[in-house]
Amino acid sequence: MYAPDVGYSKSQMVPCTLSTSAHKICLMLGISLNALHVQLNGDIIRRLDPYEHPLVLQNEYLAGLGYNDIVRIQEEGTKEDLGYLIRFYAGERFNNIVLLHE
């Protein structure tokens, strides 16, 4: 998770499983229940619905890139440079970032 008000320099690893919802992550971080966002390929950022599962989104994204071995997906999911492809933001303050509100 990245804090939107400090840019890309500060991140926090949040332990979760495939069944961990955005709602639960927000509770763990002590943030508003609608303050979790995802960004793919450095494109538009969208707010996650409380019932969405960020780790599932990440794994599906990696599978879409051609990773089909679950062990390899897990390995890629822990790499720091994955943040250039898929990035999760925790918080409500976005400066100079386009948001997609669904």
Image (tube, rainbow, N blue to C red):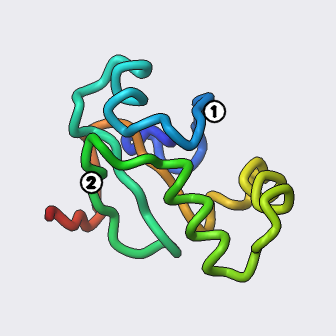
Amino acid at pointer 2: Arg
Asked whether 96 or 21 is in front, the reply is 21
Task: Give me the residue at 57% from left, 67% from top.
Answer: 60
> Which of the numbered marks, if any, corresponds to residue 47?
2
For mark 2, give the secondary structure: strand
Q: Quadrant of the C terminus?
A: bottom left
- Would residue 45 be found to the left or right of residue 60 on screen? left
**Can you say whether 58 is above or below 10 in the image?**
below
Amino acid at pointer 1: Met
Q: Residues within 10 Å of mark 2 (few under 14, many from 20)?
A: many
- Would residue 2 be found to the left or right of residue 46 on screen? right
- Would residue 92 be found to the left or right of residue 102 on screen? right
> Which of the numbered marks, if any, corresponds to residue 82?
none
Q: Residues within 10 Å of mark 1 (few under 14, many from 20)?
A: few
User: Do tag 2 and tag 1 residues touch (Cβ < 8 Å)?
Assistant: no
For mark 1, give the secondary structure: loop
Task: Give me the residue at 42% from left, 21% from top.
Answer: 29
Asked whether 6 or 76 is in front, the reply is 76
In percent of width and height, residue 93 lies at 26, 41
Task: Name the residue that disc number 1 marks.
Answer: 13
- Would residue 32 be found to the left or right of residue 29 on screen? left
**Can you say whether 56 is above or below 42 in the image?**
above
Task: Give me the residue at 57% from left, 70% from top.
Answer: 61
Q: Real-space Cα distance between discs 2 and 1?
A: 19 Å
In percent of width and height, residue 79 lies at 78, 53
